[in-house]
């Protein structure tokens, strides 16, 4: 679940969620500039959640805005705990940190600025226990298959 096999990080940003409550109306935007179209990239969700988070998973809507103005909506699911309730993230105490790979060996189709907009999709107006959400984009270091 945690990422270990990545090359150089080209983008990483984490955004704090006020009071650990991610409101359905709160959209998080990340702007990533891509120049190298010959390199494959891995994308990760960075998450810090409290043990008071009431679910074992997290659904997120991610809208990708391409440099040419086109946009695309994806629904992503991240597993945060096993069936017994043991958190996958690391950390001592009540806060767990995870970095979850969700795009592997992605080739971007065009150069320029991509905007990734994340919003929680858990059907709750206020989602308790989410302290930070982030995005990391790294050059893939895995050998070609």
Image: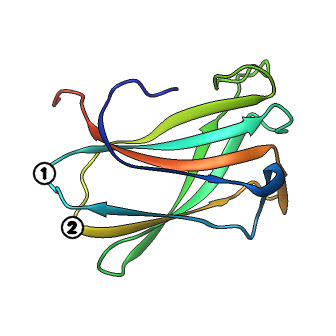
Residue at image point 80% right, 38% down? 55
Q: Residues within 10 Å of mark 1 (few under 14, many from 20)?
A: few
Relative to residue 82, is residue 102 drawn left or right? left
Location of mark 1 (residue): 38
Secondary structure under tag 1 reads loop
| x, y percent for residue 29 | 54, 66
Which residue matches tag 2? 111
- What residue appears at the point 53 percent right and 35 percent down from the top-left corner? 99
**102 lies left or right of 21:** left
**Viewer-proximal residue among 15 and 118:** 15
Residue at 62 percent across and 41 percent down: it is 47
Quarter of the figure with residue 121: bottom right
Q: Residues within 10 Å of mark 2 (few under 14, many from 20)?
A: some
- Counting every numbered tag in the picture gives 2
> Is residue 124 or residue 99 the one in the foreground?
99
Q: What's the CA distance linking mark 1 and mark 2?
A: 11 Å
Helix, strand or loop status at disc 2: loop
Tell me residue 75's x, y (percent).
56, 56
């Amino acid at each position: 679940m945690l990422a270990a096999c990545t090359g150089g990080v080209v983008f990483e940003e984490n955004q704090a969620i006020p009071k650990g409550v991610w409101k359905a109306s709160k959209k998080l935007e990340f702007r990533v500039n891509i120049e190298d179209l010959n390199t494959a990239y891995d994308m990760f969700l960075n998450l810090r959640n409290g043990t008071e988070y009431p679910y074992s998973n997290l659904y997120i809507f991610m809208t990708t805005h391409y440099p040419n103005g086109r946009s695309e909506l994806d629904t992503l699911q991240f597993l945060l705990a096993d069936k017994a309730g043991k958190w996958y993230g690391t950390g001592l105490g009540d806060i767990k940190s995870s970095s979850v790979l969700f795009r592997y060996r992605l080739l971007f189709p065009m150069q320029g600025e991509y905007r990734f907009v994340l919003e929680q999709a858990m059907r709750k107006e206020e989602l308790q226990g989410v302290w930070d959400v982030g995005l990391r984009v790294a050059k893939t270091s895995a050998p070609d298959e």
